[in-house]
Image (cartoon, rainbow, N blue to C red):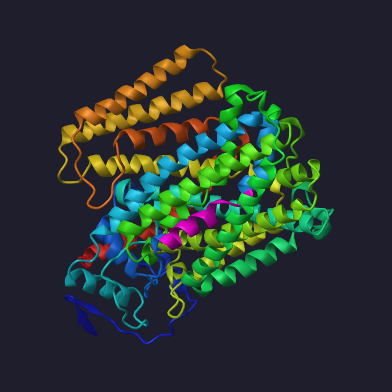
Amino acid sequence: METVGGSSVGKTKRRAWTCSKQDFLPEESFQSWANYTKALKETGTRLKDRITSRSLDKLELTEIRGRSGFEMKKTLSWWDLIWFGIGAVIGAGIFVLTGQEARDSAGPAVILSYVVSGVSAMLSVFCYTEFAVEIPVAGLSTNEDQLTIQRIADVDRPWLPSHTVHPRMSIAGGSFAYLRVELGDFMAFIAAGNILLEYVIGGAAVARSWTSYFATLLNHHPNDFRIHAASLNPDYSRLDPIAVAVIAIVCLAAVSSTKATSRFNYVASIVHLAIIVFIIIAGLTQANPKNLSDFTPFGVRGVFSASAVLFFAYVGFDAVSTMAEETKNPAKDIPLGLVGAMAITTGCYCLLALTLCLMQPYSQIDPDAPFSVAFQAIGMDWAKYIVAFGALKGMTTVLLVSAVGQARYLTHIARTHMVPPWLAEVHATTGTPVNATVVMLVATAVIAFFTSLGILSNLLSISTLFIFMMVAVALLVRRYYVSGQTNDSDRNKLIAALVLILASSMATAAYWAAGGMGWAGYLVSVLVWLLATAFLWWGVPQARAPQTWGVPLVPWLPSASIAINTFLLGSIDGPSFVRFGIWTALLLVYYFFGLHASYDTAKAASNDGV
């Protein structure tokens, strides 16, 4: 036995990589049927504890992070993060959905739809950036903190050698870690489950689209490269082995090295931007301003309806925030990386949408390959090959960066033992979470192999909008509430303001979804939102100021993020909400099983004095 930091730690010689019951269910509640029966009897008490408990910044940086054994390598700069952001975002959304929404929902006003979605995404970027910077900013400033993370790694993985702790610490958990600190385990788990679903579904959709553009490049129909299983449901009968192969290659790249992935993404993104510039310049040489004469054929409702769908084109930037643990200087690099990437992306999207609408009347835009068909229509048939190549490159980098981001989400969830801790392992040589990467991409490959793009595209935006709304709520909680410091009066004022902000935002969205056309309903709900936000600004003192970088104009910008994300949720179709509800219900069922693991882990850490 060895004593570290005042506690006895057993040093057991084991292989670094195993796949035993202890790797998946090491907690006390799962050591015997008697233990599990006892845990089930305490489900109510444990559930209350998990719902009401909140994590701490320092806990996420020491105990939770130490459970991966080895450190992720800190190799990324703000320049890397900008290109990761561009690579994560600019892909299938702009090349696949623009034509569909321009023709069927918004007309030339699809340009405004991209602006609305871009504003929503930028507001969320600000919220993500403050969390990504402020949670790790304190770092491990004392020797005691550094010994703590070493001791936790030794206790959780005694067969792993001691590792060096970097003085500037950060975490890979993204929105899961942020919500766990501010809103507690329960809300963090529900949110994280939905963002993982978004990654898997989005990755599958991009992989299926990859096959389609690859077929276009070779002058074939996409189904020429798919296997038709006539006995299956038509929505699941076109089996796509190329999509699976692409995902497998991406998996190998993602587990090899984060820095190598960054270099590939950097070069590929430069090529991609060059192709986008070509599309814009070549397209504008054939522009016909008359195509914009009927700018809003579907009215304002069409603009916002398209915005809700096109939000998928911005999904991916949150993956950059999960790379905080591998960033050299999070306080400087993450704000520059996230905001820079989103600004470049929004500008490219608006210019591409404008170019497309100037090339063809909106009613003639092809919904499947809009840019390729548009170039054919203006007599530049050769350009479709450049467009197809650019789309393939964009979708490849989206898959790659998503693979990196989703694995880090799952890694941090596994560190809390809400899913098996085996998924939290970081490989000693590559410094990457191999197990989490492989598991997520296997799930993506299975769905991509069977499921049609039409089914996948209906599941995409709702989870992300929900997560972004929750992160904005969490930021307001972080700024205005500190446990043990905020008095009861200010806490109650904060709760009241948040309830009114959320209620007024949901009322506006519901009125819009119900087809409300009168201005009175919107006037009332927007006025309540304004008054609630103003009350929070003037009537509740901030309990915490950001140490390095913070969202400007708090509470106005986070409150606006809540409102616009909720409003866009009101523009999504009903079946998507049904699927969202089914998935959330499945998460709740799993949580009743997983809460015993997270409860045991939290209590063990508490007993150890961590």
- 349 versus 590 height, above or below: above
| Residue 38 in view (yes/no) | no
Tell which of 150 and 546 is nearer to you: 546
Q: Residue at x 51, y 52 (%)?
A: 316
Q: Quadrant of residue 284?
A: top right
The outermost residue toward the bottom is: 13
**Mainly helix, strand or loop, the magenta region?**
helix
499 relative position to 115: left or right: left
Q: Which residues are magenta?
A: 79-92
- How far from the left and from the top, in percent, is residue 422? 45, 70
Q: Quadrant of residue 108?
A: top right
As for residue 80 lying within the magenta part, the answer is yes
Q: Residue at x 57, y 45 (%)?
A: 313
- 31 versus 312 height, above or below: below
Q: Quadrant of the C terminus?
A: bottom left
Q: Residue at x 45, y 32 (%)?
A: 564
